[in-house]
Image (cartoon, rainbow, N blue to C red):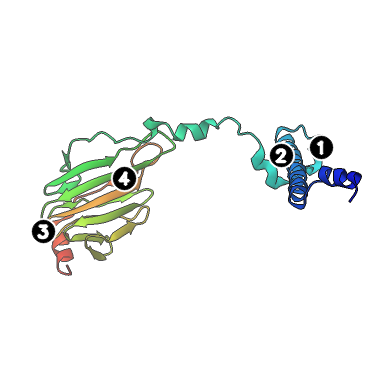
Amino acid sequence: MTHADETRQAREPCGAARQFGDFAAGLVGFTDEAITHLAFLRGLAEGHAGHDRREGAVPQHLSLLAPPGPVPAETAGRTRRQHIQIEPKNPTVKGPAAWFTGDVYIDAVHARKAEPSRMACGWVHFTPRARTAWHSHAIGQTLLITEGVALLGARDGTVIVARPGQVVYTAPGEEHGHGAGPGNFMAHIALYEGTEDGDGATWLELVTDGQYAAATTIS
């Protein structure tokens, strides 16, 4: 081997060095390509990619790349602490004699709020034999029985016996009464909607002892 050949061989990289050089060159190319793609995506998000965004030029699924805008006021309002709160406890009140026979006690669970809300809810406890007067609700009433045995009667003589966990619905305008059986306390949660000018209840005459006795025969 001549001196010139030895010099040329020394200057040429060995196989391992040549493979590393090829890998490095490829890595540089990959990095340049990745940077190019990232720059393109950022340009799409910021609207500076040089492409016309009108006429649906940017695919819909890329919209998530857009920087977030301000939170809508109605969404922000839901996260404020004062919109989730423990309501103050109202004192228990005794049901008025014009509406009830016997001793009945009422806890207001939910008092009607400002419009458009018209919902109201009360937890009502009846002593044995206590019952409501005949009455109706303009937009109906739902009762959830929580304790004892409830007797619910309609004007046509229909009587429903309901126990804890059962839900009874009374249609709008249906005249009815409900109360406890003769040997037990009874409690229910009453839910109803009011009307524009009131609670929607129409109170009528008291349920007589004879009407109550007839209802107890099937309980």
Q: Which quarter of the rendered picture does the C terminus lie within? A: bottom left
Query: Which mark is first along the chain, 1 or 4?
Result: 1
Residue 214 sits above or below residue 97 on the image: below
Q: Three-letter amino acid code at disc 2? A: Leu
Quarter occupied by residue 25 = top right
Residue located farthest toward the left when viewing the structure as drawn: 183
How far apart marks 3 and 2 lie (CA) works out to 75 Å
Q: Residue 132: image x %, image y %?
A: 20, 51
Residue at horizontal 25 percent and vertical 64 percent from the top: 160
Query: Which mark is first along the chain, 2 or 3?
Result: 2
Q: Nearer the viewer, mark 4 or mark 1?
A: 1
Q: Are marks 3 and 1 in contact (CB under 8 Å)?
A: no
- Residue 184, disc: 3
- Residue 38, disc: 2
Q: Alpha-carbon neighbours of circle 3 within 10 Å: few (<14), some, or many (≥20)?
A: some
Q: Is residue 207 visible?
A: yes
Which residue has dot 4 on it? 201
Q: Residue 107: image x %, image y %?
A: 21, 42
Q: Three-letter amino acid code at disc 4? A: Ala
